[in-house]
Amino acid sequence: MNEMQLKYGCNPNQKPSRVFMDNGSDLPIEVLCGRPGYINLLDALNGWQLVKELKKATGLPAATSFKHVSPAGAAVGVELSDTLKRIYFTDDVELTPMANAYARARGADRMSSFGDFIALSDECDKATALLIKKEVSDGIIAPSYSDEALEILKAKKKGNYCILKIDPDYTPDPIEHKQVFGVTFEQGRNELDINTELLNNVVTDNNELPDNAKRDLMIALITLKYTQSNSVCYVKDGQAIGIGAGQQSRIHCTRLAGTKADTWWLRQCPKVLDLQFVDGIKRADRDNTIDVYISEDHNDVLAEGEWQKFFKVKPEVLTAEEKREWIAKNTEVSLGSDAFFPFGDNIERAHKSGVYYIAQPGGSVRDDNVIDTCNKYGMAMAFTGIRLFHH
């Protein structure tokens, strides 16, 4: 089959809508369940490329959680700590490497991942399907599914969950096209191989990049390759913990992603771990409540009468001082940027969220200022010499 009719395009008024292969070959995807939409397929195909490259670069199973053509999370199959199992709500599941990767990808930014499209680098197994079963998700793409996993996923959304099987050997043409306002654009595909050799040009006084930092910087750069620009990505422990996508100013990317990284870390704070929710609370309500509790607006949740909807016991306020002290404990975070940092203010903001290691193209007229700011904090920064804009 070289053509698939879709319900509509990006919006319901955009009809007709279809995907097709203009060279007459078959589509590289097979629909096993459900009916994919236009944005679903954009997320699926971008997500598949991301996890395929992560697997190649790290040798580990990889997963991503996509929303609106940018990843909300991306990760490889590093075993979860007991604390991460708690904040990802997986402490009652026996996790496989693939399930670890998905739990990390979904758990980094649970609010943004709500209603995601999932991509997996390897076969979806039963453990991963059981995690997905509990989440609000639009669909999944993977190279294969175990029989048990497929049965579990086909039961989602009353049998309408979108399940796509991708041909792992499919290779697209080296030239790609798209239309905007009736004008056809053509370019060579971004086939840049992202590997640790890109990290050889360390320009700071601290020139030490341990293996875990190299792995995390690979995750950051590959994630950025499929994130709408401008973009930056904070990574720790084998997973993205904060992605700032599609901002016009790089400092806004760095602030947005840094705030997400801070929220991820604050969710591991004892006061947050000890929150006691009412029985039967929906997962989205719980996630939203945690986010508001952590934010500056947490007193709204704790207002008299309001908190009773969510908590068995009224929680103590998480003060601004307590948050600052806890965030200061987050260290050895890696940061990638899809283009150069034009000012040292990006480094100042990254430092507040525990960044020690940075990979960016370099090439700004203010590179010296950026390097000096890194040196002030003892950071190690590599100039990759490559830009990763994605639109």
Image: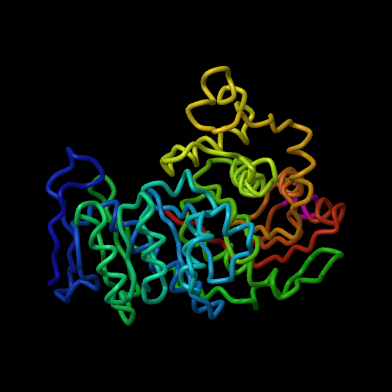
Stretch in magenta: 365-370
State the image coordinates of residue 136 (x, y, percent, origin top left).
Answer: 36, 49
Which residue is drawn at the image coordinates 58% and 19% (left, top)? 303
Residue 207 vs 229, above or below: the answer is below
**Helix, strand or loop: magenta stretch:** helix
Which residue is drawn at the image coordinates 72% and 48% (left, top)? 353
State the image coordinates of residue 357 (x, y, percent, origin top left).
Answer: 73, 62
The colour scheme applied to this rendered structure is rainbow
**Closer to the camera, 170 or 66?**
66
**Closer to the camera, 256 or 302?**
302
Q: On the rendered structure, is 347 left or right of 122?
A: right
Which residue is drawn at the image coordinates 63% and 48% (left, top)? 261
Q: Quarter-wise, where is residue 383 in the image? A: bottom right
Which residue is drawn at the image coordinates 58% and 55% (left, top)? 86
Residue 281 falls inside the magenta stretch: no
Residue 70 vs 280, above or below: the answer is below
Residue 368 vs 199, above or below: the answer is above
